[in-house]
């Protein structure tokens, strides 16, 4: 049974989310306070976090930053904030998805399941094979161990960043637009916010490129999308 934590200060919304996840055989804990929520998240061994932004004790952005700095689990923000700047900030701090209130509980559960499946796929611990590694110039991507090295030095990527990088490196010299990447990686088609693609590409570049402003691996093809160049 997958265990998730809901950090939400509105008791009605928290219980609504809890009820729907219980119906889908999740184990669920609820925290109504931000500071208590982050402490429970860091010590509870959860598979997924559902996070509001406007919380007493500690705001959701700071919670997201803190959790992402120590854990690699899916974080889904559910918030009444609808401005693009809030979504981009959330993605930039490591959130995997952003759902605006009011929301469909069934859609929220579907998104949670999709993110869990993708995290399991890329952190499943399969044994390495001869095709387990992609080496391109100074970049080395180890598939089953979920590790990336640049000039022999390991760089730390989140599970979603790793998935984006691995997908593009596995399909070199092909141009993918943001919508295609979002559908391939997040698997949610048009139900999500494709702004997360731009954020994740930017963060990957900061970690693997010698000069992120002049990328040599993930290039921008203006008006078309992104291409991984070998």
Image (cartoon, grey):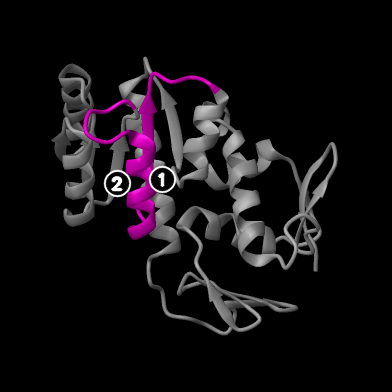
In which quadrant of the rendered view does residue 208 lie?
Answer: bottom right
Where is residue 23 drawn, in percent x and y? 18, 31
Q: Residue at x 37, y 24 (%)?
A: 79
Q: Which residue is mark 2?
A: 48
Q: Outermost residue, top direction?
A: 102
Residue 170 visible to an observer of this rendering: no
Quadrant assignment for the C terminus: bottom right
Mark nearer the viewer, 1 or 2:
2
Q: Quadrant of residue 43?
A: bottom left
Camera-nearest residue between 222 and 209: 209
- Along the horizontal axis of the image, is 74 left or right of 88? left
Label 1 Cα neighbours within 10 Å, binned few <14 / some 14-19 / many ≥20: many
Asked whether the residues under the numbered discs 1 and 2 touch, taking CB atoms below 8 Å apart as contact, a structural biologist would say yes
Q: Which residue is mark 1?
A: 115
Image position, residue 146 (x, y; %): 48, 69
- Image: magenta residue range: 54-83
- Residue 64 part of the magenta segment: yes
Q: Residues within 10 Å of mark 2 (few under 14, many from 20)?
A: many
SS at mark 2 in the image: strand
Q: Is residue 114 magenta?
A: no
First in sequence, mark 1 or 2: give its number. 2
| Front in this rendered view, residue 174 or 97 | 97
Distance, label 1 to label 2, CA atoms, is 9 Å
* Along the line of sight, the residue nearer the viewer: 131 or 11: 11
Q: Residue at x 85, y 41 (%)?
A: 222
Q: Residue at 16% of width from left, 41% of height from top? A: 36
Rendering coords of residue 184 (x, y %): 59, 45
Question: Disc number at residue 29?
Answer: none
Residue at the right extreme, as displayed: 222
Q: Does the rendering let one see residue 8?
A: yes
Tell me if residue 35 comes above or below residue 108 in the rendering: below
């Amino acid at each position: 049974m997958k265990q998730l934590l809901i950090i939400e200060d509105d008791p009605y919304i928290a219980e609504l989310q809890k009820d729907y996840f219980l119906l889908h055989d999740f184990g669920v804990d609820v925290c109504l306070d931000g500071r208590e929520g982050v402490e429970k998240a860091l010590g509870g061994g959860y598979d997924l976090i559902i996070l509001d932004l406007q919380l007493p004790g500690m705001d959701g952005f700071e919670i997201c930053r803190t959790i992402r700095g120590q854990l690699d689990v899916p974080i889904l923000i559910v918030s009444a904030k609808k401005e693009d700047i809030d979504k981009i900030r959330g993605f930039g701090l490591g959130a995997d998805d952003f759902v605006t209130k009011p929301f469909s509980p069934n859609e929220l559960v579907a998104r949670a399941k999709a993110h869990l499946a993708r995290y399991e796929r890329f952190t499943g611990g399969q044994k390495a094979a001869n095709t387990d590694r992609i080496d391109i110039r100074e970049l080395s991507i180890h598939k089953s161990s979920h590790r990336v090295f640049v000039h022999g030095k390991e760089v730390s990527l989140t599970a979603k960043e790793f998935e984006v990088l691995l997908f593009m490196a596995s399909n070199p010299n092909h141009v993918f637009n943001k919508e295609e990447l979002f559908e391939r990686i997040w698997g949610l088609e048009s139900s999500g916010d494709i702004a997360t693609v731009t954020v994740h590409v930017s963060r990957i570049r900061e970690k693997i490129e010698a000069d992120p402003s002049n990328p040599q691996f993930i290039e921008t093809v203006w008006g078309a999308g992104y291409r991984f160049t070998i």
